[in-house]
Image (spheres, rainbow, N blue to C red):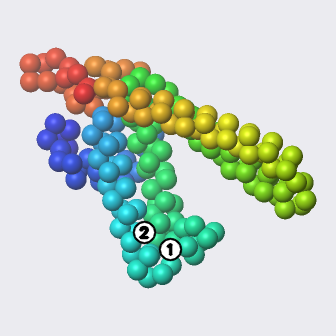
Amino acid sequence: MNPNSMTPVDWAKRPILEKYADFSGRAPRPELWWYMLALVVAYIVASIIESILGVHRMIAGMYGPLTTLLWLATIVPSLAVGVRRLHDVNKPGWWVLLPLIPECLMIVMALTTAGAVAAGGGFAAAAGGLAITGLLGLITLIGAIVLIVFYVMPGAPGDNRYGPNPYGIGPDGTAVPAE
């Protein structure tokens, strides 16, 4: 399908139906942002359905079965479209892990702190653990902001080391700049 004639619905479904686990190549801005918008709408709808059915806190006291299944079904295409978007701005796909690594460490630290407090560690254990958890949270936020900046940048014009321009060749025979 010609990227210049795709509708927002086409852009939104492309990461799931056509490029589910494709981490190579490039994804222009519309592919990422229309997919993310569709994902937010799907999560809102799933959450409303779970609330109506009364199952919105079944899993770990925080998540419902529909949102959990939606997350499991979309984690791979979400990472893939993020990696391809980074490729479009000529960045390595590993940048997608920038906010994820400190977030995972933050979760581990929070659980460790909760365990220390529950074991009778007192204020000292809680204060130290909370300080480190807060610092990791700040690092996660900074990483997410950097990633968003990369996502909103225009793609590299012409071909780059990750593949051809997603918009191809223009009518005059020159490369169409990635938007």
Residue 126, compared with residue 152, is above or below; it is below
Q: Is residue 179 visible?
A: yes
- Judging depth in this view, the residue of 109 and 79 nearest the camera is 109
Residue topped by disc 2: 47
User: Would residue 136 be found to the left or right of residue 32 on screen?
Assistant: right
SS class, disc 2:
helix
SS class, disc 1:
loop
Residue found 32% across the figure and 51% down from its top = 37
Q: Amino acid at mark 1?
A: His
- Judging depth in this view, the residue of 162 and 36 nearest the camera is 36
Q: Amino acid at mark 2?
A: Ser
Real-space Cα distance between discs 2 and 1?
A: 7 Å
User: Would residue 143 be found to the left or right of residue 105 on screen?
Assistant: left
Residue 38 sits in which quadrant?
bottom left
Residue topped by disc 1: 56
Point out the image quarter for the C terminus.
top left
Residue 66, compared with residue 4, is above or below; it is below
Q: Are marks 2 and 1 in contact (CB under 8 Å)?
A: yes
Residue 177 sits in which quadrant?
top left
Point out the image quarter for the N terminus.
top left
- Number of marks in the rendered image: 2
Whole-percent x, y for residue 51 in the image: 44, 76
User: Would residue 147 be found to the left or right of residue 26 on screen?
Assistant: right
Whole-percent x, y for residue 87 in the image: 41, 29
Residue 33 sits in which quadrant?
top left
Give the farthest residue toward the bottom.
53
Residue found 48% across the figure and 51% down from its top = 76
